[in-house]
Structure formats: structure tokens, C-alpha cells
Amino acid sequence: MLSKKALNHIVLLSCLTLPTSMAIASGDHDHGNGHSHDKPHSHDKMSSDMSGMFLKKKTIDGYTVSFHVMQAKKGMEHGGSHNFMIKVEENGNALSNVKINSKVIRPNGEAESKMLMKMGDWYMNGYDLEHKSKHQLMILFKTADGKKHKGGVYYP
């Protein structure tokens, strides 16, 4: 029988390896520069199934970026109430040599930035995202060629 802590690790790891077919195309237009429109589209909500999972894909400078947010399990918090995770892919393959900085702007305008740490094909860190209004989630990532790329989505 597995301990509760071991089961929590399995749940987290299974979420980190979700098939990309579970993501819903965003329809955002980033005009090739990683910037989407100022206001989120109604389909930006995409997010939730019964588990409260948020998973959204977006193309940024030719890279497919998956934005994933999930409530942190007790004992599995990585700095906040929710785990904010990013996967960057090129031609269907996850990039493992990127540096990613993240920033959350809360509904009250307060901002917080954190570097994301690598966990398998994903990069993650924790943020407090319990307020039910929209949070702006942004990333700036640097690829192996030294180029910087930025983009973001709204949560929830």
C-alpha cells in the first residue's frame, strides 16, 4: 500500500505528463511577437474539468507553450496555493535546455516573479492564486540559441 505522500507525488507527476491532446487551442493572436490582445477572449477560460485543472496551449515565436495551473496538494506546495507549470515544445519535442522566468499579476495589481524549476518536461513554481478573479500569468524564456521569448495567458 502506498503512503499518502507517495500518492500525492504520483498525482503530481501524472499531471506533469498529461498528453498534449488534452489542451485546447487558445485562438489568441500573438502577431508573432508573443503578445496577445490586452483583453482575454471568452475562450481563454478554457481551463477547467472536474478536477479544477487549467491547461492552455499557445504559440509563441514558433514554439508551442503549454500553461498549466493546478491546486497544490497538501504537502506538495512549491511556494504557493497553486503550481504554475510551463512546457515549451518545438516540432512536438519538449525543450529541456530553456531558462524560464515567470510573473503573476494578481487582480489587485500586485506582481510577483519567480524562476521556474525543471521537473521532467515541465518547468514549475508555486504561486498563491486563490482569489477567484483573473490573474495574468506571464513568462519570459531564453532558448539555447540565446534568444528571448515572452507571452502569457489569463487564469482562470
Image: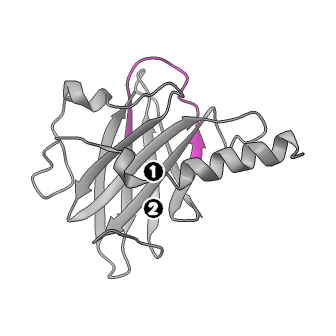
Based on the displayed image, in which of its 4 quarters is residue 41 positioned? top left
What amino acid is found at the position of numbered circle 2 in the picture?
Ile
Looking at the image, which residue sits at the far bottom?
145
Disc ID at residue 112: none
Are dots 1 and 2 in contact, CB under 8 Å?
yes
Query: Is residue 126 located in the magenta-colored stretch of the structure?
Result: yes
Please name the residue shown 23% across and 29% down the image. Answer: 43
Residue stretch rendered in magenta on the structure? 125-137
Q: How is the image coloured?
A: one colour
- For the N terminus, give its image quadrant: top right
Query: Is residue 76 located in the magenta-colored stretch of the structure?
Result: no
Disc ID at residue 100: 2
Disc ID at residue 102: 1
The location of residue 4, given as percent across then percent down, is 84, 39
Please name the residue shown 53% across and 29% down the image. Answer: 129
- Say which element carries label 1: strand
Q: Residues within 10 Å of mark 2 (few under 14, many from 20)?
A: many
Please name the residue shown 29% across and 56% down the image. Answer: 150
Question: From the viewer's perspective, is 48 left or right of 61?
Answer: right
Please name the residue shown 38% across and 45% down the image. Answer: 22
Relative to the observer, which residue lies in front, 88 or 128?
88
- For the C terminus, give its image quadrant: top left
- Say which element carries label 2: strand
What amino acid is found at the position of numbered circle 1 in the picture?
Ser
Above or below, 16 relative to 81: below
The location of residue 100, given as percent across then percent down, is 45, 61
Whole-Å distance between the Cαs marked 1 and 2? Answer: 6 Å
The location of residue 133, given as percent across then percent down, is 41, 18
Relative to the observer, which residue lies in front, 5 or 39?
5
Relative to the observer, which residue lies in front, 14 or 55?
14
